[in-house]
Image (tube, rainbow, N blue to C red):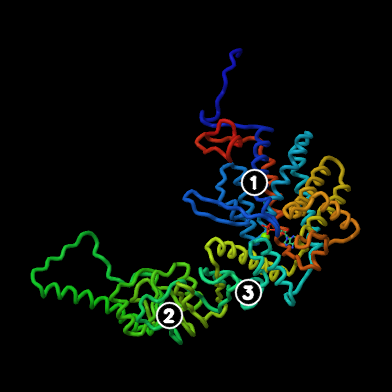
Amino acid sequence: MTDKQPIYILPENTERTVGRDAQRNNILAAKLVGDSVKTTLGPKGMDKMLVDGVGDITVTNDGVTILEQMELEHPAAKMMVEIAKTQEKEVGDGTTTAVMLAGKLLENAEKLLDMKIHPTVITKGYNLASNKTKRFLEELSVSVDEQGDVLKFIAMTAMTGKGAEAVKEKFANIIVEAIRQIDEKEIDLENIKIVKNKSYGIEDTELIKGIIIDKGRVSMDMPLKIDEAKIALVSDALELKNPEGDAKISITAPEQLQDFVNREERLLKQIVEKIKFSGANVIFCQKGIADVVQYYLAKKGIYACRRVAKSDMEGLARATGGRIVSNLNELSEGELGKAQVVEEVKQGDESMTYVRGCENPKTLTILIHGGSEHVMDEMERALKDGLGDVVSVIKTKKIVAGAGAIEMELSKMLREFANSLSGREQLAVQEFANALEFIPLTLAENAGLDPIDVLTELKSRHDSGEKYAGINIFNNRIEDALHEGIIEPVKIKSQAISSATEVAIMILRIDDVLASKGNKSPVGNGMGYPGME
Ligand code: ADP
Ligand code: MG
């Protein structure tokens, strides 16, 4: 028994990091992710330019977009990206806040670890703090109805800093008008389609009742406009199928060739007959339409679009009450969708098809105009943030004061609660409170203000009972954010707190990382687990 033989329980190519090393490494990665989006927070946040492998550019201020495109490799960093995705899915806004909060919670936890406080004590404290914070959040939230300008201000706050500044009010009006048209109880954002058109400027962005397909009619001989449209939706090509394999046709006499051509033409004509027979005067086809078919469709006065995207076909089906058929033999009057008008409209050099007065009146389209793809993409993200926030307020009818006001008040309440605790958990709850202050601090920093001055002033205002005092970045003054209309749905904050805490705790509980060497190296230089290639 004297000869100590090492026992290997892991495959040879596994790299293992344990204890503080593993924690330090994970925390560092998470902190870096938090820091990477920090400068984009708030109205004066900067944008990021992301260039992907093939040189495509995205210019954005949107947390989740940035993180998704960064293609992070480090496992802890990936967990941070998940927070942003969850936040985006649940609320549609607040992604930067959620990720920053998680990063800060971990950074602060590191201080506690350095003080030899055990991770389980920290995670227990963080859990306690998170639950308390959510309860305080409920207490601090303000009930609203949808009358007045509440929804408009919610939309405007959501879009601040997204490059939509000049048209923020117009966009907010579009968002509110759009949402009001959809039935209150069953708001489904699927019903609001966003289409982009590179002509005019963003200020010309408009709300259209109906659906827009970014394709014109296939043939100039077709009518420009159809009233009382009966719409066929076909997923298959309106062409003759090529025979499988290499089929040979032997033709020995000229009349045989003529026969063959005639036969093809007859079959193609039959396609048009079937469409006409169903009663349709408009057809949207997901695939191609043969020239001959186009010719006969035009002759019969039918409006046709080809190569319509699958998502558009589905949107058309929802909007017009039609059913997508793959086989023309299935097409009958019952399958057709209905709309008052189908019309080709020229927008700049592009032709589009407007389908208005749909069977389902809740179908709406926001047509974004703009000079460049990059600008329009960012406008789309801004609109989606606004839409998500407005829907959230309609659902919960609860808002909170933005501009860092809510975080300051929560932090204050949490600190008071911490004082009632004894033992080391108290320290964890205090660090949680500190992490919340990171939001107003960063808002100030990003606006070029002295963060410490702002934080000190905010603290004293909250201590003297100004619950809604926040840093208004438009005039750089500390003001009542509620009164100034800087308001956000409560759900943004509760979701951000939940998911940030969850991930911070999960990362803190890891003290052993077993990585197969086959993995690629995580996050840049010096960030990898030792030995990971
Ligand atoms: P997120 O991805 O977390 O939504 P944003 O860049 O959209 O990040 O910034 C949101 C933050 O900006 C919120 O804390 C919000 O209260 C704040 N904010 C919005 N408008 C103002 C304003 N006028 N002054 C100060 N802060 C504002
Ligand atoms: Mg936002």
Q: Is residue 117 above or below residue 170?
A: above
The residue tagged with tag 1: helix, strand or loop? helix
Q: Is residue 186 left or right of residue 533?
A: right
Query: Which residue is depicted at the point 70% across and 57% down?
Result: 44
Pointer 1 residue: 33
Q: Residue furthest bottom?
A: 228
x and y percent of residue 414 in the render?
83, 52
Question: Mark 1 vs mark 2: which is more N-terminal?
Answer: 1
Dividing the image into four quarters, tell me where ligand 2 lies: bottom right
Q: Residues within 10 Å of mark 1 (few under 14, many from 20)?
A: many
Q: Name the residue tied to disc 3.
A: 174
Q: Which residue is mark 2?
A: 231
Task: Give the x, y percent position of residue 358.
Answer: 51, 81
Residue 458 visible at all: yes
**Mark 1 close to ligand 1, CB under 8 Å:** no
| 242 up-or-down from 100: above or below | below
Q: Amino acid at mark 1?
A: Val
Judge the density around disc 2: few (<14), some (14-19), many (≥20) Cα neighbours within 10 Å.
many
Q: What separation in Å lies between label 2 and label 3 (alpha carbons)?
A: 28 Å
